[in-house]
Every structure is written in C-alpha cells, then in structure tokens.
Image (cartoon, rainbow, N blue to C red):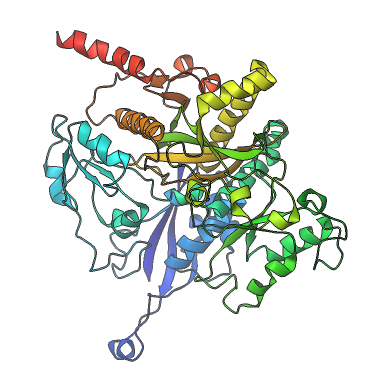
Amino acid sequence: MAVLCLRWRITGCEYRLAGFRYAVTVISNAAAKRSPPSTTALQQYSPRNPSDISPTWFAFQQFIGGQESLTVEHLWKQDLEKIQDARPSFCRYSATYSPPACADRKLPTPYTRSPQRPPPANKMALRAPNKNLIRFRCFWKTTVIFEVLKNRGWTETNSELDWDFFWSDVGWMYEFFDHIHLADHQRFNHFRNYYELTRKDLLIKNLKRMKKTLERDGQTVEAGKYNFFPQTYALPAEYGLFVEEFKRMSPDPKLTKLPKGAKSLQEVGVWIMKPVGKARGRGIFLFTRLSQISEWKKDHRWKIENPQVENYIVQRYIDNPYLIGGKKFDLRLYVCVLSYAPLKAYVYRSGFARFTIAHFTVKKEDIVNNLVHLTNFSIQKHAPTFKSKTGTKWSLHSLKMHMISKHGEQEVNALFHKIHMLILRSLLAVQNVIIQDKHCFELYGYDILVDDTLKPWILEVNASPSLAADTPVDHELKYGMLDDVLTLVDMEHKLPPQSLTQVGGFDVLIDQTAPPAAKPPQQSHLLGCYNDRLENLKELRKPARQSTA
C-alpha cells in the first residue's frame, strides 16, 4: 500500500488531502514481459481511518465521485476538469501531485520525462544575470521582433538552454518547457496553457463559465455585460444542440434550401464555421444550410472521443457589421500580460483596422466569397485589386477620428470604453485557469468587430500575432509596439519599482500588484489616441540619469 498526498490550491488557499490509501496492482516481471502496462494501475481508494475523513475529503468525493476508481492520469486530466466545471474559482492548473518520500517512486506522475528531452538546465542557474549583456534567442528571424532585439544591443545565441530572453513559437514550449529548469532571471514569451484564451472553443467556454459564476454569485448586472461573443457551439461535442438551435431559427422546415424569394443572408440567418486551432482565416467558411456540413457527421472519425478529429466552432454570423466606404473591417489590438496572479496587463494605444477589398454584401450568391466576409491580410492580399504599397489597413487613430466625425466624440469614446472593458473581462475569465509562471509574459493580438449599432464583438485572441511588416506604416507601428513590450518586460532593470500607468505606448489595463490607494484609473479613452511613446520613455529614463549623476 502506498500513501499519496494530493494537493490543491483553491482560490488562493491550499488544501491538503492526506492519508488515503491506494491499492497498487503489482505486476510480476514475467507478466510485465508478456504485456507491459502503459501506467501503473491505482485502484480503489479509501480513508485510512475515520479521523482522516474531513470536510475537504467529502468535497473531494462530491466532485469526483467516491465510487470511481482513481489513477493519477485520470485524476489529472479528467477529474480536475470536473472540479473546475463544478467550482469555477478552483484553479485546476495550479493543482500538483506530490507523493511523499515513503511512496513508491515508480508511481506515474502527470509529467513524465522522455529520454529525447534535454536534461534540466541546472548549469544556467550558475551564470548570474548581466543586465549589460543580455543573450537572446528568437524563433522568428525574418520579422520585426528580431530587428528590435538586435537594435537594443542584445546578443543573439543559438544555445538551446543558455539564454536570458527567448521569443519562441508555441511548438518549442510543447517540446521543452516542462522539462527544463529556468533561472530566476530568464523570460519566455508564452504562458504554459496560453490556449485557454487563444483557442477559439476554450475562449468561449471560459467566457460562458465566468458568466455563469457571476450569475450564481448574484452579480447579474456584471454577468449581463458578458454579451460580447456571438452564439457559439463547439463541434462535434455540441452538434446536437446546434442542430436544435438551427432548426428553431431557420424559416425553412426542410433545412435543405433557402426559402423562395430570399435573396439576403439577413432574411434566413447565416452561420460561420471556424477551426479552433488555425489562424489567418484558414479553414473558415459560411453556410446557411445543414446539408453544407452534414457530410462531416458521416465521417467515422468525427466523434467526440476521437482525439484526431479536428474541432470546430460554429457561430451565429454577425451580418450587420459597421461599414466604411461599403467595406467590412475589424480591429487588431495588442495586449501585453506580465502576470496572471496577480493580474497585470497593458494595452497598446495604437492598432489598426483591417478592411476587405470587396464591398460587403449579404446576397446569398456571395456567401462563399471570402474577400467579402474575411478581413485577414493573408486572404485579402490575393485579391486582383490589392495594392501592396497601401495595403488594406487604417491606423486605429485614423479610424477613431473618422468615426468621431460621423457620430461625435461621446459615442465613439463610449465604444472604445466598451472595447477596453471587453479585453479586461476576457482576461478575468481566464485568470484562475492560466498557469502563473514568473518566467512568462505574453503578447496577444485581439481581433474585434464593431457592428452598425457601435457594439464591439470579440472574434478571437491570437497568441502569436503576425510580426511581419507589410507596409512602412505597419513596420513603424509594430517596431514601436515590440520595443515597448521589451521595455515592459524590463530585462535591463531600468523601470522604477512603483506601478506605472504608461510605459511607452502601453497604458495599464489592470494592475492588481498596485496597493488600493495607488491603483490607477482605467485609461479606456486612450485607445486610438495620439501615441506619445517616445516622450514617455524619455520621462521614464530621467530618474535613472539623475541618480547616476
């Protein structure tokens, strides 16, 4: 019998469940040779004695079911998710499995080390950080970020482990991040489970969960403000629910064709299908009939339990977008999160609007024309009338000035305040889910659509927003933004210790590290305003020069 200790951190408090005995199936060497097990089986569990039964244990039974067999793998990957669904304030990603010294060392753990992985980089911790010589690695060597890193005077290194700063793709993190030891000063540009915010289905799941939590806590007014995402279903898991809603909303009982005389998508309703793990508009299409997606259901691989199936979300299409010159657009905004626990995030006051080449129309014959409905640059650049010098973008400042001329300053400021709060609420929705790590920060690209009633809608959040420059204006914006990201991360330790409301072009979105008396007011009106980043950086450097003198 082996004694295990399961430890959870729930809403900032640590609970310990100790003293539970697990009957371990012992397999002889001969049996192992015949059929080697994938993991050691941990069968039924029970309290050691009545004194071990605590309120926490009863809560544990209530969540996972006291009659189920338990394995570490089962507990980590399935039951903790059940606990998260039952109690949204519970942070399943900060739960840890820690067997005591007397436990069998051969018991499986949630994280196993493959022999192909590099060994822990213990030697890195021996090298003291040097703010005058920062060694960086960069996965994207043909983009603006590599240029910014070089121009800051940092030294590039190709070492797999010996670096101070690493701007990587998410693939490297999957391969190595959980299998190396990082020194205190090292920084990395992704959080471990960043996908809770950036994968389309998980984003909606977390927003819905936050809304239900607020409703259960009696905060109905705040819960009602989580209305900035379209009606969404995850496929294939929620295919049945989607079909019911589709039939309820469709005017055609047979669901095979548009009603006679219907020429507009607005007359029948249109849905948009998006793969959850792709970007730049790949795999997205619109449809108005179930027959357009019914072929997927016939595929034997399209089952919930099949891990190889490509998951999609289906959303009610927003068919009344705000138009400028008859063309649809969305907004790309940049948000830098330095910490999730406590939450500290900044939003960049500059951004841009991405326009379509073709004029927007809701005629049924244009439903398959992505040049009408999708604003992604990777799609629009293939249009015959595309001009590489001018592109299809407006600066956020130009867009704001145009809208003020049409609707007045008060209405437009109200719109940008809603966008500001939309971003903040999306981060609060994942704060208890994303794993906090002092080595991590993240730059997100928010895509937001504005409809003709001046209501903002969240489309998606990108963990790896494009850092390539398409035009000189695009290069100027991204260069300044990325340079300010590095200033925020502060590898050189040049920023003052107190909380800052502005760093370069970044304005504080939320800072839970600041004391209550020093918490800055929300700076929502600064989105789209003049970007005085150079003046601000000059002011921030003044105290350092004076103290040096």
Along the viewing direction, whichever of 227 and 409 lies nearer the viewer: 409
Residue at 57%, 54% (x, y): give it: 201
Tell me: 265 left or right of 477. right
Question: Where residue 450 appears, x then y in whole percent?
Answer: 64, 35
Count how many numbered circles sit on residues in the image: 0
Residue 539 falls in which quadrant of the image?
A: top left
The quarter of the picture where the N terminus appears is bottom left
Along the viewing direction, whichever of 387 and 23 lies nearer the viewer: 387
The quarter of the picture where the C terminus appears is top left
Q: Is residue 29 visible?
A: yes
Residue 270 falls in which quadrant of the image?
A: bottom right
Along the viewing direction, whichever of 298 and 376 lies nearer the viewer: 376
Q: Is residue 217 visible?
A: no
Relative to 419, does residue 120 appear above or below in the rendering? below
Q: Residue furthest front?
A: 385
Along the viewing direction, whichever of 130 and 309 lies nearer the viewer: 309
Question: Where residue 300 appears, x then y in whole percent?
Answer: 60, 79
Tell me: 182 left or right of 198. left
Question: Where residue 543 appears, x then y in whole percent?
Answer: 25, 11
Relative to 175, does residue 458 appear above or below in the rendering? above
Relative to 3, does residue 379 appear above or below in the rendering? above
Residue at 87%, 57% (x, y): give it: 261
Residue at 68%, 56% (x, y): give it: 367
Relative to 131, does residue 142 appear above or below in the rendering? below
Residue at 63%, 40% (x, y): give it: 328
Residue 127 falls in which quadrant of the image?
A: top left
Question: Where residue 73 appears, x then y in whole percent?
Answer: 44, 67
